[in-house]
């Protein structure tokens, strides 16, 4: 019983593939979270009364 080459590669590197997917997902989540929360330039503390 022999597997195809692509199946062997996927079976051999499944942990690394999952790690990459999770790492990219976390990066996207942090970028989207920062976009939803807004930048520091719009914060109230920037507008100081003199």
Image (cartoon, rainbow, N blue to C red):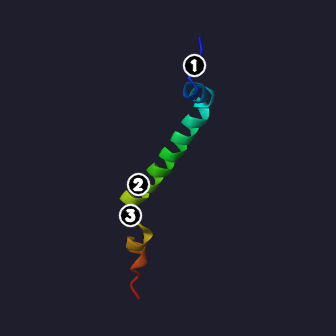
Q: Is residue 48 above or below residue 14?
A: below
Question: Disc 3 marks which residue?
Answer: 38
Q: What residue appears at the point 45 percent right and 56 percent down from the top-left corner?
A: 31
Query: Which residue occupies the extreme right position in the image?
Result: 12
Q: Which mark is residue 3?
A: 1
Mark 1 surroundings: few (<14), some (14-19) or many (≥20) residues within 10 A: few
Mark 2 surroundings: few (<14), some (14-19) or many (≥20) residues within 10 A: few
> Is 46 in front, or is 27?
27
Looking at the rendered image, the quarter that the N terminus falls into is top right
Give the mark, 1 or 2, whose residue is nearer the N terminus: 1
Give the mark, 2 or 3, whose residue is nearer the N terminus: 2
Q: What residue appears at the point 39 percent right and 60 percent down from the top-left corner?
A: 35
Residue 38, x across and y down, in percent: 38, 64
Q: What residue appears at the point 41 percent right and 54 percent down from the top-left corner?
A: 32
Disc 2 from disc 3: Cα separation: 10 Å
> Is 5 in front, or is 16?
5
Q: What residue appears at the point 50 percent right and 51 percent down from the top-left corner?
A: 27
> Is 38 in front, or is 31?
31
Please indicate whether residue 23 sits to the left or right of residue 41 in the image.
right
Give the mark, 1 or 3, whose residue is nearer the N terminus: 1
């Amino acid at each position: 019983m022999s597997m195809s080459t692509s199946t062997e590669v996927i079976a051999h590197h499944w942990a690394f593939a999952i790690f990459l997917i999770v790492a990219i997902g976390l990066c996207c989540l942090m970028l989207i979270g920062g976009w939803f929360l807004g930048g520091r330039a719009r914060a109230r503390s920037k507008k100081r009364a003199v």
